[in-house]
Amino acid sequence: MKEINAADFQQEVLNGGKVVLDFYSTECPPCEALAPKFEAMAELYGEKIKFLKIFRQANKELATSLGISGSPTLVFFDNGQKILDTISGGIKKAEIVERLDKMISPDEVKAIKANQKKTVSEYDVAILGGGPAGLTAGMYLGQAKIKTVLIDPALPGGYMGITHQVSNYPGFEKPQPGFMLAHYMSEQAKQTGIDFKVAVDITSVDLAKKEIVIDELETIKAKKIIIGTGTTPNTMNAPGESEYKGKGISYCATCDAKYFVDKEVTVIGGGNSAVEEAMFITKFASKVTMIHQFDKLTANQTAIEQLQANEKIVVLYEHEPRKFEKRGDKMVATLEDLKTKEVKELVSDGVFVFIGFKSNISVLGETLPEMDKWGYIKTNEDMQTNLPDVYAIGDIISKKYRQITTAVADGTIAAITISKEL
Ligand SMILES: Cc1cc2nc3c(=O)[nH]c(=O)nc-3n(C[C@H](O)[C@H](O)[C@H](O)COP(=O)(O)OP(=O)(O)OC[C@H]3O[C@@H](n4cnc5c(N)ncnc54)[C@H](O)[C@@H]3O)c2cc1C
């Protein structure tokens, strides 16, 4: 795989035949998660399609001219023409394969698929999810010499990895960048000898049979499964939201705020995440307008006080977004004033969305553990679900407080329980 810069674009891309170009950034967890998948794809499809990478921060003008404002973004070209739709953010291997398969003939696709081999491996414990909960469980199980695999479609770290600063994880005098905590926890777990299968696609999970298939070809059988798959940010489902995801609408301030130096930004939400991330964005942006549906912010009092002291932030209470459009370089949010029903437009350089979370249960197959009415998994005090040999830990379980400390506690309990059982 080759790295190019804007000066090579004409020669390598526009005159390059069939090309897939990865715009990546540094300090961007989804970019790191994509890198090994992109390399694996390059090995498989490399004879038919050219795989190129370009560092977005150093080639901003080119990125902007192609309408790219999120990292990573994959752009596809054939004979100098942009083809297919671009993909951005937490890109799945299947999304890339779907596009690559459209770039070559059905016979070529068949030949590539025939080259791939199926494998089966066996473990005592498979951990789904490499956030703080899963990493802690992995560390304890590894230290107990239990054969364990940790599986994650992204890089290890979970939300910790994309949190700007963590000031409430014990053991550190000063606030720690979230990605450093993620790094420490992940290295500590790795050193115990457990296997990491990260940045993979989860093809299927069968909690009854205890079988997980990843990347379509690799079956993992385990005696016990720990679910630590966390949560996913809610989307607004407003027209334009999915269209401009990664092209003006972002869900990750750590990844994208740095592109808004001296620009105006809209933040949707009013809970803790929205308030914390809005304050982080003001390190770069000249103005942040927060859109919140209620007449008060729902974040904790300390965060609200810090926000109120921040002169760059304005809050529009009792407003909801109804539509997103792009006009030139600007993002236009159509907002409804929930009190007066008046509809107005808010023009800014980019939109960030932080409006709560839902549990990541959709990939857990047909046999699901018992859940509460909000879709969070019920466990007993040993983190056992109602399904035999299936445990759940961290943000995905039904509980009151979702923090790194509570996630690592759940991981500890599940791992010690399992160590005594095996
Ligand atoms: C913006 C923000 C700021 C925060 N700040 C703080 C803070 O300052 N202090 C604090 O204590 N807490 C903070 N939190 C909360 C804290 O990050 C979470 O409580 C904690 O990360 C939960 O850990 P977890 O391991 O349960 O889940 P997560 O961290 O969500 O990790 C889940 C992992 O599972 C993976 N996964 C998803 N689907 C699958 C699948 N099908 N198979 C396998 N793996 C899967 C994900 O890729 C991810 O790596 C913050 C949260 C957010 C969103």
Image (spheres, rainbow, N blue to C red):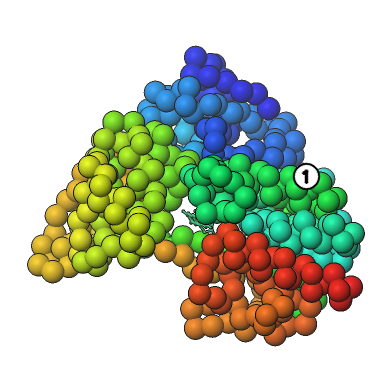
- Asked whether mark 1 lies closer than 8 Å to ligand 1, one says no
Q: Which residue is the extreme one toward the front?
A: 173
Residue 318: image x %, image y %?
20, 64
Q: Quadrant of ligand 1?
A: bottom right
State the residue at coordinates (53%, 42%). Answer: 174
Type of the residue with mark 1: Ala
Drawn side of residue 7 relative to residue 114, left or right: left
Q: Quadrant of residue 322?
A: bottom left
Drawn side of residue 318 relative to residue 379, left or right: left
Any part of residue 348 in sight: no
Q: Viewer-proximal residue, 216 or 263? A: 263
Residue 421: image x %, image y %?
86, 76
State the residue at coordinates (87%, 66%). Answer: 124
Any part of residue 290 in sight: yes
Q: Viewer-proximal residue, 382 or 366? A: 382
Residue 343: image x %, image y %?
14, 59
Name above or below for residue 58 compared with residue 160.
Answer: above
Q: Viewer-proximal residue, 103 or 226? A: 226
Q: Which residue is mark 1?
A: 111
Residue 300: image x %, image y %?
36, 62
Q: Quadrant of the N terminus?
A: top right
Name above or below for residue 108 compared with residue 237.
Answer: above
Q: Residues within 10 Å of mark 1 (few under 14, many from 20)?
A: few
Q: Quadrant of residue 410?
A: bottom right
State the residue at coordinates (67%, 56%). Answer: 130
Q: Secondary structure at mark 1?
A: helix
State the residue at coordinates (59%, 28%). Answer: 53
Q: Quadrant of the C terminus?
A: bottom right
The total of numbered circles placed on residues is 1
